[in-house]
Amino acid sequence: MLVLLYLITLDLFLLHIKLEILFNMSSLQVVSLGTNNLKGSLPREIGNLTKLQFLYLHGNRFTGEIPKEIRNLIELEVLNLEFNSFSGSLPTEIFNISRLRNIALSGNNLSGTLPPNIGSTLPNIEILYLHGLTNLVGTIPHSISNCSKLTDLELSQNKLSGLIPNSLGYLTPLNFLNLWGNNLTSDSFLSFLTSLTNCRNLKYLNLSLNPLNGILPVSVGNFSISLIKFDASACHIKSKIPNEVGNLSSLLDLHLSDNNFIGSIPTSIHNLRSLQRLDLNNNKLTGFIGDNLCKLQHLGDIYLAQNQLSGSLPNCLGNVTSLRLIYLDSNKLSSNIPTSLGNLKDLIKLDLSSNNMVGSLPPEIGI
Ligand SMILES: *[C@@H]1O[C@H](CO)[C@@H](O)[C@H](O)[C@H]1NC(C)=O
Ligand SMILES: *[C@@H]1O[C@H](CO)[C@@H](O)[C@H](O)[C@H]1NC(C)=O
Ligand SMILES: *[C@@H]1O[C@H](CO)[C@@H](O)[C@H](O)[C@H]1NC(C)=O
Ligand SMILES: *[C@@H]1O[C@H](CO)[C@@H](O)[C@H](O)[C@H]1NC(C)=O
Ligand SMILES: *[C@@H]1O[C@H](CO)[C@@H](O)[C@H](O)[C@H]1NC(C)=O
Ligand SMILES: *[C@@H]1O[C@H](CO)[C@@H](O)[C@H](O)[C@H]1NC(C)=O
Ligand SMILES: *[C@@H]1O[C@H](CO)[C@@H](O)[C@H](O)[C@H]1NC(C)=O
Ligand SMILES: *[C@@H]1O[C@H](CO)[C@@H](O)[C@H](O)[C@H]1NC(C)=O
Ligand SMILES: *[C@@H]1O[C@H](CO)[C@@H](O)[C@H](O)[C@H]1NC(C)=O
């Protein structure tokens, strides 16, 4: 009795098998055919494999619709059909298979909506990857808060609209939340962010390219120190950057570019001791750059271009020897270029164009 079928990619072979040979193997529990060159459609008979627990068909060239008979796979725990060319509607039948822990359908030509009752139909879901479907529309259902085991929610690059539900904050195991590139909105206080501060395991939060249209609340300082990447670039945010961001002491990446932030770079930034990349490009930041950045001994990339920063370039920047990229172009900086920048042995790019810099280039630079 065949229970497992594994065909892992063999680089030298183009795998051609007829899926039909599977469908009489009614005891199959695992089908693992990911990353091969399988093509054609997925036959309705897939629904005959009612003992199936794991179905991996990702990274092939399957076309056609995902058959509705998939609803018969009531034992299914993992369904991975990512990065194929499945088309037609996102089968809502999938969201009725209550044992599912992992659904991965990213990168297919699928259309549809998330079911409003997802919280009751998928109580065991841990991983939901629906990135880059051709036409995923509608809202993120409130009931998702009842998917109480969810750790990874990947809904980026779709056409979701409406409010980001505050109920996401009930998902305490949430580790990864990627919503970039949708049409999602919020109330003007971005209160969903305040709710998300309850998710003490959250490591990755990407909201970029959504029309959030609000202010960044001081509650961002209440995110757990588990947060390592935070991206809210191009979200139509207009406010100061709250000093509380300095609380996020584990952050590696902070991206707030292409918004309408005003005021100065928060002085608390010196607390972000792990920070590797700071991107505040294209805002309306004013004031001096100040010495606070110089305390960030892991900082590799600084993007502060297209703001209204003035004053001089801090001399202590030459102590941040991890620096590789510095973009300060299109500001109102004046003064000489500090000779200390000659210490930055790994520097690849220093862009100071369109400022009011004076003096001559220090000889230490470029040696
Ligand atoms: C599957 O089983 C049926 C009935 O036992 C048989 O008629 C059919 O030929 C089998 N199909 C394949 C592809 O082996
Ligand atoms: C397999 O599935 C097809 C279509 O769903 C069905 O007509 C057929 O009876 C099934 N065969 C078996 C052996 O269950
Ligand atoms: C995507 O699917 C639609 C039908 O659902 C079809 O009209 C379109 O050609 C498909 N696009 C690609 C790139 O396969
Ligand atoms: C999902 O299950 C519910 C309850 O069993 C049922 O009413 C509904 O029709 C099912 N939906 C689909 C798309 O199978
Ligand atoms: C979550 O489930 C509980 C119990 O079934 C229910 O009362 C509640 O309305 C659900 N919450 C949402 C937001 O759907
Ligand atoms: C984005 O959502 C708004 C409603 O919140 C709607 O009016 C608008 O048409 C949507 N835009 C796109 C490109 O879908
Ligand atoms: C931050 O969390 C603390 C403790 O839960 C709470 O008292 C405080 O109101 C929160 N601050 C904001 C701005 O939400
Ligand atoms: C957020 O998503 C955008 C779009 O893919 C990407 O460019 C950016 O690097 C992501 N941010 C982080 C912190 O990973
Ligand atoms: C967050 O930062 C603010 C201001 O910098 C500070 O008053 C507050 O105590 C910090 N909260 C936590 C939880 O560290």
Image (cartoon, rainbow, N blue to C red):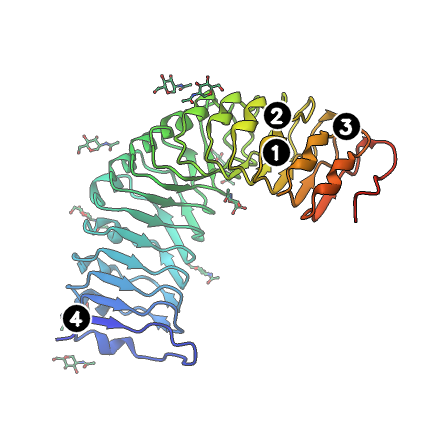
User: Contact (CB < 8 A) between labels 1 and 4?
Assistant: no
CA separation, marks 1 and 4? 54 Å
Label drawn at residue 332:
3
**Quadrant of ligand 3 in image:** bottom left
Label 2, ligand 9: CB separation under 8 Å: no
Which amino acid lies under the numbered mark 4 shown in the image of this protein? Val
Which amino acid lies under the numbered mark 1 shown in the image of this protein? Leu
Going 43% across and 22% down the picture, which residue do you hit?
219
Q: Earlier in the sequence, mark 1 or mark 4?
A: 4
Q: Is residue 85 left or right of residue 335?
A: left
Q: Earlier in the sequence, mark 2 or mark 4?
A: 4
Toward the viewer: 26 or 357?
357
Residue 218, placed above or below residue 13:
above
Which amino acid lies under the numbered mark 2 shown in the image of this protein? Ile
Going 31% across and 74% down the picture, which residue do you hit?
7
Mark 4, other Cα within 10 Å: few <14 / some 14–19 / many ≥20: some
Label drawn at residue 3:
4
User: Contact (CB < 8 A) between labels 1 and 3?
Assistant: no
CA separation, marks 1 and 3? 15 Å
Residue 33: percent from left, percent from top: 32, 70
Q: Which residue is mark 1?
A: 280
CA separation, marks 4 and 3? 68 Å
Q: Secondary structure at mark 3?
A: strand
